[in-house]
Amino acid sequence: MFNATAIDDLARRLADLVPPGAREARDDLASNFRDALRAGLRKLDLVTREEFDVQRSVLLRTREKVEALEARVDELERKPGAP
């Protein structure tokens, strides 16, 4: 679900921010950053782009149906003899 390359790149960039005196711990820090990022993203309950697009499509179709029904109700209410 997540782009592993992007997570690895971000972990590497965070490790690059480590002060020069702690460079020997850089690989460990990069690994820890990567694990922390993955764990944090898993907790966010995100959906894939595909799932999002499917739900968006369903919502648009539903909206179109509701608008059509509203128009039909308005039309029926304007007819003579309507309550």
Image: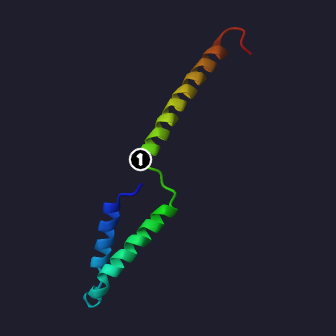
x and y percentages locating residue 47 in the rendered image: 47, 51
Place residue 31 in its image quadrant. bottom left
Look at the picture and state if 65 lies above or below 5.
above
Instruction: Work out which quarter of the rendered image holds the C terminus and state it.
Output: top right
Depth check: give the residue in front, 37 or 77: 37
Q: Quadrant of residue 66?
A: top right
Residue 78, located in which quarter of the rendered image? top right
Question: In the rendered image, which quarter contains the N terminus?
Answer: bottom left
Disc 1 is placed on an element classified as helix
| Place of residue 68 in the rendered image (x, y in percent of width and height, measured from the top left) | 55, 22
Amino acid found under the numbered disc labelled 1: Arg
Specify whether 11 is left or right of 63: left
Instruction: Pick out the residue farthest to the top.
Output: 80
User: Tell me, what colour scheme is on the image?
Assistant: rainbow
Image x and y of residue 33, in percent: 38, 74
Q: Which residue is mark 1?
A: 49
At horizontal 25% and vertical 88% (from top left) the residue drawn is: 20
18 vs 57: above or below: below
Q: Relative to 15, say whether 57 is above or below.
A: above
User: In front here: 50 or 63?
Assistant: 50
